């Protein structure tokens, strides 16, 4: 379970910003659906981000995805001398040359009913890890945190007193451009292997607004998992999205004559990962009046494809997942968006969802609590700032959150200069 995460000097985020999943209010009406009790805390299942275009909503999701993948997979995904691919806040001469910062506070169960609270910190430049630290404590309120490891800019690693195993080997294997956590997991250290498995299984990446083609992951899952495909088709029918009776996947190998024009590096990558040397094409089978008609994926509506992308995270809610979705409502009817959230809240056990949206009707839908709703805006210096409704004083419980938002109470609204736009396009006032 993710308690909170913090990010600084990354993309449009200059100063340290924290998104917390710890409940800040009490509401007996929805406590059981929205909150997960753990170690004396109440952890929320959902966090939702509002904000104007280019305010930084997507950036904080992208930054979280970047740091999570770096912490988990940098040892295997990066070559020895490869860049870390870190991008700092560039609208400041100082921060443009400084490291980014990431902090993740999360629970992991050592045994049944025995949660451990981990606190992971990382400072990262475009070439190497500057600092890395992991601590753990058995109870959030009573126990002091114990050091698991601490890594400094010179690459030296200080190990906690209770950490056994091939510590010198792990320290020697850890490259400047990868995390100790990912290295130790590959070295099969029991503690780090468990951390790796927990984080990699829980973190399900990011679902971005649908493109013209479905993701390779989605198509492969439909191809390999018959039960999942039936669930997809069943959800289409239940959601009144066409009369789809089947989804057929055609798989083709990339032609050799095409591969010959690729770089040697790309060819080596395809040899190491044969799955990437395949292309997949989806055909949707529609059934009307007892007749079936095949349509290529390109003929399907944006709403159909978006729903197909969202079924995967909804299907995974029973698998202890942490899911990021950018622009949840993209191409979907409001009723389907609300249905998706209701299903997530009712069906999930300890899964969590962080999503961005522009759907203002959700603010008064009764589906979201005040401590689940966050607003993002940019300062005059281009820095993204994030606040929850509960960070604002004197909010009347009975007031419309949508009207308060539209009135500018929470910021996060675009400031549009209509007169300037009319001048640019030589528009005349409509009389």
Image (cartoon, rainbow, N blue to C red):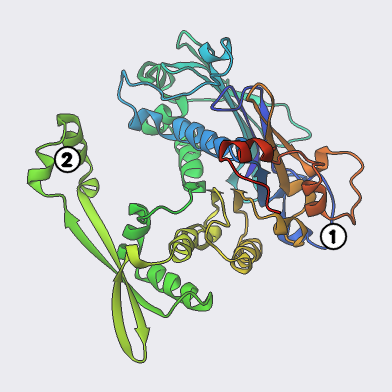
Q: Is residue 234 left or right of residue 145?
A: left
Disc 2 vs disc 1: Cβ atoms closer than 8 Å?
A: no
Residue 58 in the image: above or below residue 161 = below
Which quarter of the figure is the N terminus placed in?
top right
- Residue 342 in the image, given as x and y percentages of width and height: 65, 65
Mark 1 = which residue?
A: 28
Q: Earlier in the sequence, mark 2 or mark 1?
A: 1
* Residue drawn at 21 percent across, 36 percent down: 269
Q: Is residue 55 left or right of residue 305?
A: right
Q: Give the number of the disc on residue 271.
A: 2
Q: Which image quarter: residue 267?
A: top left
Q: Give the number of the disc on residue 2.
A: none
Could you say which is closer to the camera, residue 41 or residue 289? Answer: 289
Residue found at the far top of this picture: 154
Q: Is residue 427 left or right of residue 297?
A: right
* Res. 106 visible in picture: no
Q: Is residue 36 left or right of residue 238?
A: right
* Residue drawn at 25 percent across, 58 percent down: 280
- Residue 294 in the image, given as x and y percentages of width and height: 28, 75
* Residue drawn at 48 percent across, 64 percent down: 303
Could you say which is closer to the camera, residue 300 or residue 228? Answer: 300
- Residue 166 in the image, given as x and y percentages of width and height: 40, 23
- Which SS class for mark 1? loop
* Residue drawn at 40 percent across, 27 percent down: 183
Marks 2 and 1, how far apart in space?
56 Å
Could you say which is closer to the camera, residue 81 or residue 417? Answer: 417
- Residue 376 in the image, given as x and y percentages of width and height: 68, 37
* Res. 246 visible in picture: yes
- Which SS class for mark 2? helix
**Crowd tier of the residue under label 1, counting other residues whose Cα lies within 10 Å: few below 14, some 14–19, many 20 or above:** few
Which quarter of the figure is the C terminus placed in?
bottom right
């Amino acid at each position: 379970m993710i308690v909170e995460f913090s990010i600084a000097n990354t993309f449009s985020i200059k100063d340290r910003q924290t998104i917390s999943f710890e409940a800040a209010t009490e509401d007996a009406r929805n406590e059981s659906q929205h909150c997960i009790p753990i170690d004396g805390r109440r952890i929320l299942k959902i966090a939702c981000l509002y904000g104007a275009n280019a305010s930084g909503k997507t950036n904080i999701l992208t930054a979280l995805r970047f740091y999570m993948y770096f912490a988990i997979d940098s040892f295997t995904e990066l070559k020895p001398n490869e860049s870390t691919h870190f991008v700092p806040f560039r609208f400041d001469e100082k921060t443009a040359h400084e490291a980014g910062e990431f902090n993740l506070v999360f629970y992991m169960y050592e045994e049944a009913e025995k949660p451990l609270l981990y606190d992971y910190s990382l400072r990262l430049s475009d070439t190497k890890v500057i600092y890395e630290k992991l601590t753990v404590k058995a109870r959030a309120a009573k126990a002091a945190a114990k050091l698991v490891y601490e890594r400094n800019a010179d690459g030296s690693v200080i190990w906690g007193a209770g950490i056994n195993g091939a510590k010198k080997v792990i320290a020697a294997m850890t490259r400047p451009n990868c995390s100790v956590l990912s290295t130790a997991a590959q070295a099969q250290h029991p503690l780090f292997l468990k951390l790796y498995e927990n984080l990699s299984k829980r973190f399900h990446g990011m679902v971005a607004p649908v493109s013209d083609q479905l993701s390779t992951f989605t198509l492969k899952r439909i191809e390999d998992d018959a039960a999942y495909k039936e669930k997809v088709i069943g959800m289409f029918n239940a959601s009144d999205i066409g009369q789809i009776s089947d989804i057929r996947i055609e798989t083709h190998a990339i032609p050799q004559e095409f591969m010959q024009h690729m770089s040697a590096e790309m060819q080596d990558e395809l040899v190491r990962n044969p799955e990437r040397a395949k292309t997949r094409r989806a055909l949707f089978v529609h059934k009307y009046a007892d007749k079936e008609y095949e349509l290529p994926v390109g003929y399907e509506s944006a709403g159909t494809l978006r729903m197909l992308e969202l079924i995967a995270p909804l299907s995974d809610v029973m698998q202890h997942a942490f899911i990021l979705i950018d622009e949840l409502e993209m191409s979907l009817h409001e009723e389907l968006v609300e249905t998706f959230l209701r299903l997530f809240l009712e069906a999930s056990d300890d899964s969590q969802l962080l999503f961005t949206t522009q759907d203002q009707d959700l603010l008064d839908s009764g589906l979201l609590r005040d401590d689940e709703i966050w607003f993002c805006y940019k300062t005059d210096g281009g820095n993204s700032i994030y606040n929850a409704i509960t960070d604002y004083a004197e909010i009347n419980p009975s007031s419309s959150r949508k009207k308060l938002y539209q009135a500018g109470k929470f910021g996060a609204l675009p400031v549009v200069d209509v007169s300037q736009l009319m001048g640019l396009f030589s528009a005349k006032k409509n009389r």
